[in-house]
Amino acid sequence: MKTLIICHSVHHGNTWKVARAIARELDADLIQPEQFRTGMLDQYDLVGFGSGIYIARFHHDILDLIADLPHQNGKKAFVFSTAGNCCEDYHFAVVSVLHAAGLDVVAEFSCEGYDTYRFPGQSVNSGRPDDADLERARQFARDVRDKVTEPVAVSGQAGL
Ligand SMILES: Cc1cc2nc3c(=O)[nH]c(=O)nc-3n(C[C@H](O)[C@H](O)[C@H](O)COP(=O)(O)O)c2cc1C
């Protein structure tokens, strides 16, 4: 199963740590949006999209990249993010554009990330993602792999 992960991580590199953990587990190619070229997805069976959360959304570079994709005819995809106040509610916009691009979102992951986008001098989630977060990310990757590679149930009788 050939996997591409596209990740944007501009605040503290938090989401990139998660992306690297998932990429290692799936033996995936990991790139930033500026390295993406139209047509690249044709070489992959599964695509992951990751981003920090900025004003309640994925980074606009990722959203724009997805919006510009040709229709993907049900190719499998997953999304992941880090946020100051996690969680997956922030995935609504990205999942919507992925569906519009014909991608089938099979799984989502999110965790807290170190956040200094606060009142001056304030921060939360020091040290996150931590080892436990990254282990959860690796488990997520294994679950995605199992989900995408599980045999399709065959129903009906021979000859029908
Ligand atoms: C401009 C900006 C906007 C942010 N907006 C949110 C937000 O709406 N909700 C939230 O929970 N965290 C928000 N954060 C915190 C980041 O989502 C969090 O620190 C994340 O882990 C950053 O990931 P990164 O280091 O991969 O960029 C924001 C951070 C920045 C810099």
Image (cartoon, rainbow, N blue to C red):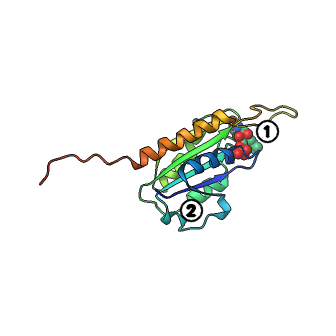
Image point 43% across, 44% down: which residue?
A: 146
Residue farthest toward the left in the current orientation of the protein: 159
Check residue 68 in the rendering and tell me which mark sits there, or answer none: 2
Image point 60% across, 59% down: which residue?
A: 65
For discs 2 and 1, the disc positioned in front in the rendered view:
1
Residue 43 x/y as whole percent: 49, 65
Q: How many marks?
A: 2
Q: Amino acid at mark 1?
A: Tyr
Image point 53% across, 68% down: which residue?
A: 39
* Side of 65 where 106 appears, left or right: left
Residue 19 x/y as whole percent: 63, 48
Label 1 residue near ligand 1, CB within 8 Å: yes
Reading the image, the residue beneath label 1 is 117
Q: Amino acid at mark 2?
A: Asp
Q: Is the residue under label 1 in contact with that under label 2 (CB below 8 Å)?
A: no
Residue 135, by quadrant, is top right
Residue 78 x/y as whole percent: 52, 47
Classify mark 1: helix, strand or loop. Answer: loop
Q: Nearer the viewer, residue 154 or 94?
A: 154
Image point 87% across, 34% down: which residue?
A: 120
Marked residue nearer the N-terminal end (2 or 1)? 2
Ligand 1 quadrant assignment: top right
Q: CA distance from mark 2 to mark 1?
A: 29 Å
